Image: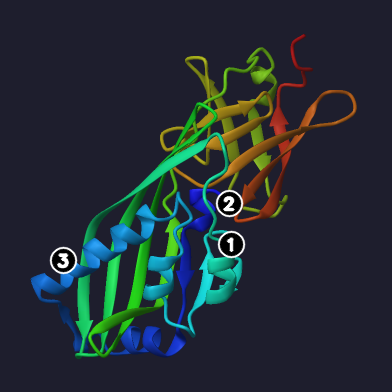
Amino acid sequence: MTIGESVAIIRNGALAALWLCAPCLAHPAPDETTAWFQSRTQALYDAVASGGQAIWDRTLDASCTITTEDGEVLDKTRFLHDLRPLPQGFTGRIRVRDLTVHAIGAQAAVVHYWLDESENIFGQQLKTTYVQTDVYRRSGSEWLAVAMQVTVVPRDLEPVDVDARGWPALIGEYRLSEHAASVYHVWLRDGALFGGNEAKSATRLIPLAPLVFFQQGSIHLMVFVQDHGGLVTEVRELHKYNEVVMKRVAAAAAHPQA
């Protein structure tokens, strides 16, 4: 699996609840403790590209539950089984930064940090940032991870060079329902499409295909849908694996330019 697939969460309800319900118990850890977590966390992610299981085995509590950033739930055994070296043609590195540690009494610690991932897939460069929170428990002189939660930090997608001659046919108004108060407008300005409720606050629609756009500063994909005659009749907002349909209610009645 890739580096991104290997970045995972370990979740333990009891300690997570303790952290959330009793914040007054948490306090910054001593410098030497923070240094240990910085070193150990970096070592864990240095081992991902090579599929190094030993350090993960030493660090993960036997009862941990691991959830990948894709929402797949694994136990420790399954996680270690799936941790394999990157395939031929793949290289990568993960850098741990801005790590902080808060102790909860003497037996638990909450570790928070960012992961900057750089990956090369047959010459294609990928860069991804994650933010992660881990919970550890002390076992004798050792720390064992019992909860690790990671999420991808959103960023704007890079534009694709597409045929923009049909974009004027997308201009207009789109509405969730005839009873909806708000209207989604699409404007064409300086050779770029913008969408939003008001012209001043509209955000750029970054092209991924002639009728597919990423809405700048969001996690939304906007897909314009044509009827059999080639007219754009609706736009679908893809948001958190759901589709929201907005029907076209005002636009120039023109077919896309050939």
Give how far across and how far down residue 31 sits, in percent.
9, 70
Direction from residue 71 to residue 216 in the image, left or right: left
Picture quadrant of residue 233? top right
Give how far across and how far down residue 1 sits, in percent.
58, 51
**Residue for badge 2:** 1
Q: CA distance from mark 2 to mark 1?
A: 7 Å
For mark 1, does the 10 Å Cα neighbourhood hold few (<14), some (14 to 19), or many (20 or more) residues? Answer: some
Assign a secondary structure to mark 2.
loop
Give how far across and how far down residue 17 sits, in percent.
39, 87
Q: CA distance from mark 2 to mark 3?
A: 30 Å
Residue 176 against residue 109 in the figure, above or below: above
**Closer to the N terminus: mark 2 or mark 1?**
2
**Closer to the N terminus: mark 3 or mark 1?**
3
**Residue for badge 3:** 35
Closest to the observer, 68 or 90: 90
Closest to the observer, 72 or 193: 72
For mark 2, does the 10 Å Cα neighbourhood hold few (<14), some (14 to 19), or many (20 or more) residues? Answer: some
Q: Is residue 75 visible?
A: no
Residue 155 against residue 83 in the figure, above or below: above
**Residue for badge 1:** 82
Q: Is residue 78 visible?
A: yes
Give how far across and how far down residue 39 sits, in percent.
23, 62
Residue 134 against residue 217 in the figure, above or below: below
Assign a secondary structure to mark 1.
helix
Direction from residue 251 to residue 202 in the image, left or right: left
Residue type for callout 3: Ala
**Closer to the N terminus: mark 2 or mark 3?**
2
Q: CA distance from mark 3 to mark 1?
A: 29 Å
> Mark 2 and 1 residues: CB-CB less than 8 Å, in contact?
yes
Q: Residue furthest right?
A: 228
Closest to the observer, 10 or 83: 83
